[in-house]
Amino acid sequence: SAHAAYRTGAGLVEIMTVESNRLILQGQLPEAILTTTNPDLLDTPEEKEKIKQAVGRADVIVMGPGLGVSDKAQKVLDLVTLYAQVPLIVDADAINIAARYYNTFPLMRGNTCMRLNELNNSLPKGTILTPHLLELARLMDQPVSDIQDNLLKTADSCTKDTDLVYVLKDARSVVAYEDERYLNYSGNNGMATAGTGDVLTGILAALIAQGMDSFEAAKLGVYIHGLAGDVAAAKKNRYSMIASDVVNGLEDVLGGMI
């Protein structure tokens, strides 16, 4: 995510993670600023202040990739959403945590999922949620097949009574905001590999950090992401592609646009 954000034009990217990840991340992406937190001390004022300050420095925050779904991960998510006054890009385990956390609520009220209501109400304006079908199925407590067969109808449930943006990731992703829908046709099946969704979160964050409206960033971001995947497929092949190939494809795509 951080690498993709840099490749999409973000001027400064900060990664918050645990200390044991420091050497790996500094070796992989030395350009990123690194802040470490101790998950065993999350209840202390000092650790809460560290997270609060990191959140306060951000123009946009990616939350979820690599987070895990432990109770400590949930505490981190709770603190970030408590302090954040800027848009979040909510993905991966942040969505899985939400699905678990909100399972005490009645699932449906009318045509709206209560878990989605509670999640939507806890997030800053302009936040983008980017679930793939399985993550969305967990959040809505519905079979994946039902969601996939009715993706536009599902988008209606997601955006009901909220000003958040949803990117419902599938072979043809749907970007939904209020009553508007965008169906993306860029990309290929070689992108169905671990980490490519994290690349998308970095792209979206970089576009918002550069001043773009969240819905516009979501529409353009999924298109750029798919184009970068198409570049990667042409240079490699669909069977051998990995997420870093998509990151590398951003250079060709954005260079061509400029």
Image (cartoon, rainbow, N blue to C red):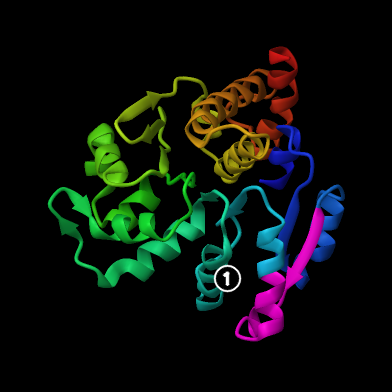
Name the residue nearer the viewer: 52 or 172: 52
> In this rendering, would 132 be left or right of 214?
left
Image quadrant occupied by the C terminus: top right
Q: Is residue 180 above or below residue 89?
A: above
On the image, the x and y values in percent for residue 247 come to 70, 34
Taking the spot 51% from the left edge, 28% from the top edge, the residue there is 216
Residue 221 counted in the magenta span: no
Which sits in the foreground, 95 or 258?
258
Amino acid bearing label 1:
Val
Please say if 115 is above or below 182: below
User: Residue at image x 50%, y 77%?
Assistant: 71
* Residue at which label 1 appears: 76
How many numbered markers are drawn?
1
Residue 213 x, y percent position in the rendering: 54, 33
Q: Residue at x 68, y 34 (%)?
A: 210
Residue 195 location, quadrant? top right
Q: What element carries label 1?
A: helix
- Part of the protein shown in magenta: 33-51
